[in-house]
Image (cartoon, grey):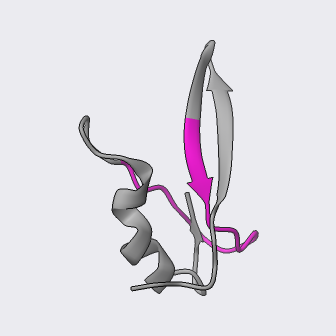
Amino acid sequence: MASSVQPKDKTVNVNGINLHYLDWGNEGKPKILFLHGLRGHCHSWDDVSSGNFAKTTIL
């Protein structure tokens, strides 16, 4: 499913380790954090994220 909403690439430093994540926006909405497995990547969640964009903040 294609979406007109594009996530923003962001990083956060946790104990000296830079972690990359995609932020689908919607500040102030309930947050959902999707994690992928060892061989996965952030775009594994693109279809799920685009379908829930209006209701939540997807990270």
Vertical placement of residue 54 versus 24, above or below: below
Q: Residue at x 56, y 31 (%)?
A: 19
Relative image position of residue 20 (x, y in whole percent): 57, 38
Magenta region, main secondary structure? loop
* Quarter of the C terminus within the rendering: bottom right
Vertical placement of residue 21 versus 1, above or below: above
Q: Residue at x 32, y 47 (%)?
A: 36
Asked if the stretch drawn in magenta spans residue 56, the answer is: no
Report whether 25 appears left or right of 33. right
Report whether 49 appears left or right of 22. left
Which corner quadrant of the image does residue 44 belong to?
Answer: bottom left
Relative image position of residue 2 (x, y in whole percent): 46, 84
The region drawn magenta spans 20-35
Number of callouts: 0
Vertical placement of residue 10 versus 53, above or below: above
Query: Residue placed farthest to the right in the image?
Result: 27
Q: Residue at x 41, y 58 (%)?
A: 43
Report whether 55 appears left or right of 10. left
Q: Nearer the viewer, residue 41 or 17?
A: 41
Which corner quadrant of the image does residue 51 belong to?
Answer: bottom left
Relative image position of residue 52 (x, y in whole percent): 48, 82
